[in-house]
Amino acid sequence: MLTELKREAYEANLALPRHGLINLTFGNASALDRARGIFAIKPSGVEYAALRAAQMVLVDLEGRVVEGRLRPSSDTATHRRLFLAFPEVGGVVHTHSTHATAFAQAGRSIPIFGTTHADYFAGDIPVTRKLTTGEIRGEYEWETGNVIVERFAAGNLDPLDFPAVLVNRHAPFTWGPTVARAVEVAVAVECIAQMALASLQLHPALRSIEPALLAKHFKRKHGPGAYYGQDSARRKS
C-alpha cells in the first residue's frame, strides 16, 4: 500500500509541470494514507525531470520521516498541518502558478466572477493574512499552515467547499479527498485566476456573480443534489 501511496504522489508531482503550474522546482504534492497516518511527498529541490517514484519520502503525521533517503519538501510541515486540521483531505498540492501567485503576492482573494469559478468554489478563493515577523523567524512552514487554518476558522469555511487558499505574499495551496483531485483544483485555480485578471482589465468595477447562478453551478457538482457527470465520477470527486 505504501508503494501505491508513493506512486500516487509521484504521478501528482509530475502532473504539475505537465499542466504548466511549475517553474524550476517550485511546488510539491503529497498523498496521505490516513488509516496509517503516513503521507508521501516530493523530496526537496529534486528536478521534476529527474524525479522517480522511489524517491518519494514517507512522513508520519508527527513529522517523522519513516522512509526515504532524501530530505522531504521544505513545505512538508505545511502539508502536515493541513492534514491534521482538515480530516476530509487526502492530498495537498502547492504551486507557484503565475496568475494565482500574482493574487497571493498582492494579498487579494480571487473574486468569483463567473460559472467556471462556481463549478469549484462556493465563493471567492480566500487569502490569508500576512505572517508576522515572529512567525517567519520561527517554524515558518508550520506557521504557514497555521495561518491557513486560522483563515478557514475565522471565515467558517468548509475546506471541501473552498478547496484552495492563497498564502499572502507566497502562493496557492490546494487540496482534495485525493491528491489527483488536489491537482485538478490547482489547474482550476490557475485558470480562474487568469480569467479573473482579464475580467478586471475589461471591467475594473465588475461585481461578483449573482448568488442564484453561483449556487446553481456549485450545487450541480457538489453535495447530495449533484447531477453533473456520472455517479461513479461524482463519488470520486
Image (cartoon, helix red, strand yellow):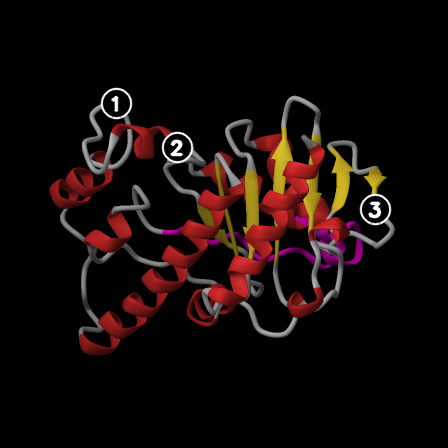
Q: Residue at point 55% right, 27% down?
A: 87
Range of the magenta residues? 125-143
Q: Residue at x 48, y 51 (%)?
A: 183
Tell me if I can see residue 126 in this picture. Answer: no
Of labels 3 and 2, earlier in sequence is 3
Say which label, 2 or 1, has the lower sequence index: 1
Question: 128 and 225: which one is in front?
Answer: 225
Per the rendering, the mark at residue 147 is: none
Alpha carbons under labels 3 and 2: distance apart:
29 Å
Quadrant of the rendered image containing residue 230: top left
Q: Residue at x 32, y 29 (%)?
A: 232
Mark 3 = which residue? 68
List the residue tagged with mark 1: 224
Label whose residue precedes the other's in the sequence (1 or 3):
3
Q: Quadrant of residue 169?
A: bottom right
Asked which secondary structure carries label 1, the reply is loop
Look at the numbered discs 1 and 3 and tell me whether their residues touch, using CB distance below 8 Å. Answer: no
Q: Which amino acid lies under the numbered mark 2 shown in the image of this protein? A: Lys
